[in-house]
Image: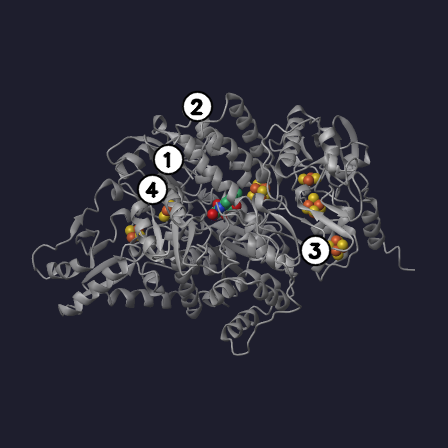
Amino acid sequence: MAVKTLTIDGKAISAREEQTILQAARENGISIPTLCQLNGTSDIGACRLCLVEVAGIPKLLPACVTRVGEGMEVSTDSERIREYRKMIVELLFAERNHVCAACVENGHCELQDLAISVGMDHSRYDYMNPKCAVDITHKRYGIDHNRCVLCGRCVRVCDEIEGAHTWDFQGRGANTRTISDMFVPWGQAASCTSCGKCVQACPTGAIFRRGSTVAEMQKDRTRLDFIVTAREKKQWIA
Amino acid sequence: MSSTVAAPSKTAPAGGAKGQPSGDNRYKMLEATMKRHQYAADSLIEVLHTAQELFGFLEVDLLLHIAHSLRVPPSRVYGVATFYHFFSLKPKGDHTVVICMGTACYVKGAAQVVSAIEALGGIKAGETTPDGKVSLMTARCIGACGIAPAVVLDGNITGKQTPAAVVDHVKGWLGNGS
Amino acid sequence: MDLNDLLEIAEKENASAKPIRLRCCTAAGCLSQQGDAVKNALQQAVADADMSDRVEVIGVGCMGLCSAGPLVKVDPDGALFEQVQPQQCASIIASLNGGGPAEASVGSDTIPFFSKQHPIVLENSGRINPERIESYIAAGGYQALYHSLREMAPTDVVEEISKSGLRGRGGAGFPTGLKWATVAKMTAERKYIVCNADEGDPGAFMDRSVLESDPHRVLEGMAIAAYAVGATQGFVYVRGEYPLAIARLKTAIQQARRMGLLGTQIFESPFDFRVDLRIGAGAFVCGEETALLRSIEGQRGTPRPRPPFPAQSGLWGYPTLINNVETFANIAPIVTKGSEWFAGIGTEKSKGTKVFALAGKITNTGLIEVPMGTPLRTIVEEMGGGVPNGKVKAVQTGGPSGGCIPAAHLDTPVDYESLAKLGSIMGSGGMIVMDQSDNMVGVAKFFMEFCMDESCGKCVPCRAGTAQIHKILTKVTDGLATSADLDTLRSLCEMVKSASLCGLGQSAPNPVLSTLRYYPDEYQACIDGGATAEASA
Ligand SMILES: Cc1cc2nc3c(=O)[nH]c(=O)nc-3n(C[C@H](O)[C@H](O)[C@H](O)COP(=O)(O)O)c2cc1C
Ligand code: SF4
Ligand code: SF4
Ligand code: SF4
Ligand code: FES
Ligand code: FES
Ligand code: FES
């Protein structure tokens, strides 16, 4: 197993060659903001919050999909990166209708955490106020598209871990929407096994357990990772 | 331009595809296409092209039939069908007017032609008049840049168009009632 | 099939040509102006005049000067008739028989529009019949493939392309030889060749024209590439909006297969190569290579981060070589005439020629092919004939990923580096001329609306950023923006450019940034004076 040595924010670290910058950073206690990345599912590099600078490369690189390299000098916290991250979070807030005070996820939401960590107090961009549906036809869960950030975690967890592929995206651009089966209400999606994995995976209050009241919904994402690790290492086979 | 967000259909169609009268030749031809591609999941777009050619548009039942045949999750079929602007999930009107909004046509005033027809039909680009008579669509360069602005009226490419001329033509289609 | 068979077909084809030939353009531009009716009328007139023994009417591809279409050229050394109407055809045929001058307007093929061209990619366009493989073979077609398969090792072919200095014509200008070498070096049980014919730039039609006018040229280039890198299967991904190009490609593939120029053991060598078509379905982003690959795999056309590059992991995970139509069309001539010949054309860093689609406020619209490094002024003013009753204000190159070059920079040579320095790009070859009546804020908004509509929606900067940029531009054109909005606009453009996942988002701000750079007054005027900008879509 080849080992690479590199620096992240000046700190010398070593990492296995198949690791991403994000994994190496996390192992060494350096935090890089992420949103679309979810342990246990494939990395897609879509939200762009994990962008970092690497000395000698003019382009910004997404830490979640970029492999470590020998002698890399990574910087995760330059002024430019901080500003871009803040803009991305503001864009997300302006894109849909996020009313945190009325959200089941209030206090446990990854988007909210991001807003706090980038120091955003309001969005400098105009709110788009799109019309978004709320679907509570599923007997246990619900989806509120007003809070969806299109990270695709539900799509991947349902496809890659549960194997149901209930979710996918329809449309494109700003008109993209998360859909279940042939764009039917979730409660009528025959493929859904009601396993609840997408509920755990969703970073915001978009997918929630029904009956949760404001600020009550707390998700346990480590459980997903646990399932995948157990499966990969065949821990459940006696 | 045209919005692709629709409301989910109210009811889930039961199980497989219904409405396949065994006499419907179109299903046979669709079947032949899928067979030629060995029912491979990655032939989805090719199959959707054929289906739209045969049926004019892609009804949900038809999409379900394709999903089952190719063994592709229904949500993915729907996702693909709505990603590409070529595919239409709604029937088109009796007549179609396609206005080129490519750069060459844009600088020659195509936007004004679009607005004029939108006002006339009370519809937006990508929509069909409520009476089902006229569909208004926009295109991105149909290769007739030399005669911009170009407008396709029921399949016939016409060039050097003006808002007034196109309005006149479309008025004929809309008939008395409007 | 071997070389002698090829030569025999060529000889037979040339021998059967009649003394007088009327080339009639049947490419999409002329067809949309009744080109088909003209061709039929000419054929009818020949039959009526009983001249079938010495006159023939041939449907050919685009002759370039589409704005004057439908075009008819008489060979050898006859007139070039412009804007031919079906009812004029009898008199054209009569004129060949000494029946006095034809009642059709006669153009000249010695005007700068034609004389300043250097056709390589388009050398057969408008000359051969694109629906007959024999016509291509008679023009020397498929000899380069023979030469490669029988007389060159794959590495020699890669070497030759590298030495020619050819760079990709799809927009980015990546060295073609380097890309081929990467794919050739990969060890894999299977490799693929993909021809990118998704031509998304609205207002550009070079690739379409090449496919409609000389489809075999592209197939031959793909086959040579396949041999060089060790691939056995190819795909041409064509825009669904190009029915004629699709039909002609289908015909061409069938003909080549029947002659054994595609398929197994081509030219009695161990080399097998098969080509299939994939039809696009209306998504600009599918021109981006990773999105295109997903689309071939039957999925939503969303790009993915690179690396891995398609050359390492492409279709179904196998090494895949993707090149543009025009890039492939350059291959056969390079193999035939040698890399030195090719490298002698163009500039230091941009070799060969480039095809441009001239459109907008310009007298001669159509297709031209000029050596790299030709000054913009030569193209726009001399060849294009300038703006009718007006002055050039700007030239837009690179479409939605490019920028506006103001008239003051018309003396810039057209090559990859010079255009980039001006904040635009070479792009695929669209060139739209704007005059004083065009409002540049409106133009920027037009392109931003395009990018917003075409964004795949996967990454946040492009999906949400283009929508916000468009919203700010709308405020500007509506006269509701403040100077602070312009600052927001600028910073947002910089972020979207640096943070987006794929080239669409990374280049979407270019039209805004270039107009902000060259026409700040027009933005300021909107802010000071309210809604002065042309109300646009
Ligand atoms: C948004 C976007 C659209 C593109 N559209 C096209 C296109 O229509 N045709 C094309 O050949 N390349 C297009 N490209 C470039 C391709 O990704 C790729 O670089 C090219 O096909 C490589 O071929 P080349 O090396 O021969 O240029 C596009 C790139 C982007 C980012
Ligand atoms: S509950 Fe499970 S099966 Fe149902 S949509 Fe969510 S992840 Fe998929
Ligand atoms: S519903 Fe949740 S997990 Fe799914 S895309 Fe939206 S925000 Fe992401
Ligand atoms: S830049 Fe735009 S088109 Fe490209 S991946 Fe991101 S959203 Fe999709
Ligand atoms: S976490 Fe890396 S791009 Fe989203
Ligand atoms: S831009 Fe309209 S035909 Fe090309
Ligand atoms: S299409 Fe006929 S000259 Fe271009």
Q: Nearer the viewer, residue A24 or B106?
A: B106
Q: Residues within 10 Å of mark 1 (few under 14, many from 20)?
A: many
**Marks 1 and 3 share the same chain:** no
What is the distance, in whole Å, between disc 1 and disc 4 at their CAs? Answer: 17 Å
Pointer 1 or 4: first along the chain = 4
Q: Nearer the viewer, residue C276 or A36?
A: A36
The residue that appears at 41% across and 35% down in the rendered structure is C415
Q: Secondary structure at mark 4?
A: strand
**Marks 3 and 2 share the same chain:** no
Which image quarter: residue C297? bottom right
Q: Could you tell me residue A174's position as x and y percent?
A: 58, 43
Pointer 1 or 2: first along the chain = 1
Q: CB at mark 3 closer than 8 A to ligand 2?
A: yes
| Location of mark 2 (residue) | C520
| Location of mark 4 (residue) | C358
Q: Amino acid at mark 2?
A: Pro
| Location of mark 3 (residue) | A186
Which image quarter: residue C126? bottom left
Q: Amino acid at mark 1?
A: Gly
What is the distance, in whole Å, between disc 3 and disc 2 at their CAs? Answer: 50 Å
| Location of mark 1 (residue) | C373
